[in-house]
Amino acid sequence: MQRSINNSSTPSIESSRIAASIGTALDRFIKNNQAQFQYASGELSQLLRDIALASKVVNREVNKAGLIDLMGAVGSQNMAGDEQQKLDVLANIRFTRALAKGGEVCALISEESDSFVDLNNAGQYVIAIDPLDGSSNIDVNVSIGTIFSIYRRKSPAGTPIQDIDILQKGSEQVAAGYVLYGSSTMLVYTTGHGVNGFTYEPTLGEYFLSHPNMKMPEDGKIYSVNEGSANSFTEPVKAYVQFCKDQNYTARYIGSLVADFHRNLMKGGIYIYPATAKDPQGKLRLMYECNALAFVVEQAGGMASNGMERILNVRLKELHQRTAFYVGSKNMVEKAISYWSAVESKTD
Ligand code: FDP
C-alpha cells in the first residue's frame, strides 16, 4: 500500500519525537529579536555575537586547563589587588580581541585593566566586563563565569571617550548578562525585555535557547554568604543571617558569584556580599559585577540592593568602585534590607 505524504498521523517536523528539536540557536534568536531594541541597527546584535564567540573560546580553554599549562597564578595582581590567574589573563585577551575585531565597542572596562581600553573610536558601545569571575575556583575545577554590561556611549561617535561615556549608572545599561562555565556552559542575557538563557552544545559549537523568559521565584529558601567573615558583619547582616537560620533556610556558597547567582535565580534565594572589616565598601565591583547581575535579576522579577539603595541607581565615581551586594528573590532581599531600615530608624 502506498502511503500518502499528507497522512495526518505523520508527525510534524517540529514535534517529531524521533528527532526532538534542539531549540533556537542564539544567532537566530538575536536576529529575531533585534527589532525590540530601540537602536535596532544590528550593532548590538553583532556585539552579543562577539561575546558569545569569545566565550566559546574561553570555554574551550577552561575545559582543558588541567591538561595544558593554564592553571595557577601569573605572579601579578590586577587593579583590585587580586592575584591574576593565567586563565584570568587569557580570558581578558580573548574577550578584548573579539570585541576589538567586531568594531562596535569604543571603550572596554575590565577587571584586569587599570583604566579603560580604547578600542574603535567610531563604536557606539561601552562594555564593562569581568572576563573570568571566581578565579579562586579555577584551579579546583569549580564553576566560574564571565559577567558583562553594555552601555551606549553618550558622546558622539568618532570623538574622544569622556567620563560621561564610562561612568554611567547601572540603570543606563542597554544589555547585560553572564556566561557560566559549569556542568554545562550557559549564556544568560537581557536587553531589557526579559531574560533568556542559552546552553552551549559543544559538538555543534553553538548556544541554543534552553531557558526562555527566565523568572526568579519571589521567595526562596537558600541564603548564600561567606559566613567565615561573620564576626565582621554589621549588626543588620548578622541579624538577617540569624533570621535565615531560624527559618531553617539552606546555606549554599560556592564562592563564584556567577554560579551562586545562577543557582539562586533558578531556585529562589539570596546572595549577600556585605561590607566587612576587610572590605569596608564591600568586595564586589559595581561596574563589571553587580550592575550586570542587578539588571538581569530585575528583568527576571528579583531585586538587587546595596542595603540602602537600588544597585542600578548607585552613582559610579570610579571604574573599580566596590559595593555591598544583596541580590536575589524579591521578598528575601526586601526582608534583608528591612534590617537596615530598622537600624536607621533607631539612630534617627
Ligand atoms: P574571586 O575573588 O575568587 O574572583 O569577584 C570576586 C569573587 O571571587 C566572587 O566571584 C565570589 O563570589 C567572591 O569573590 C568570593 O569572595 P570570598 O572568598 O571573600 O567569599
Image (cartoon, rainbow, N blue to C red):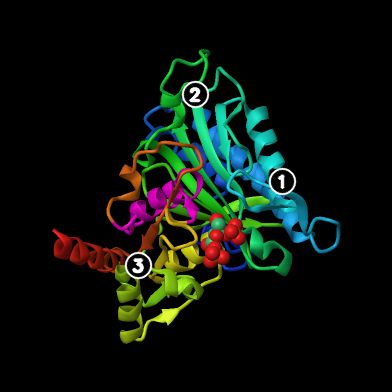
Query: Is residue 259 visible to us here?
Result: no
- Mark 1 close to ligand 1, CB under 8 Å: no
Tell me if 196 is positioned left or right of 56 in this view.
Answer: left
- Which residue is pictured at 45% across the width and 53% down the height? 196
Mark 2 secondary-structure assignment: loop
- Three-letter amino acid code at the position of disc 3: Thr
Which residue lies under the disc numbered 2?
Answer: 124
Which residue lies under the disc numbered 1?
Answer: 89
- Between label 1 and label 3, give the one nearer the viewer: 3
Q: Which part of the image, by quadrant, shows the N terminus? A: bottom right
What percent of the width, then of the height, locates residue 294?
39, 51
Q: Residues within 10 Å of mark 2 (few under 14, many from 20)?
A: many
- Mark 2 close to ligand 1, CB under 8 Å: no
In magenta, the rendered stretch is 283-307
- Which residue is pictured at 61% across the width and 50% down the height? 81
Front-most of residues 53 and 110: 110
Front-most of residues 16 and 334: 334
* Figure check: 62 above or below 90: below
- Which residue is pictured at 48% across the width and 71% down the height? 229
Q: Earlier in the sequence, mark 3 or mark 2?
A: 2
What percent of the width, then of the height, locates residue 177?
49, 48
Q: Are the residues flagged by discs 3 and 2 in contact, CB closer than 8 Å? A: no
Ligand 1 located in image quadrant: bottom right
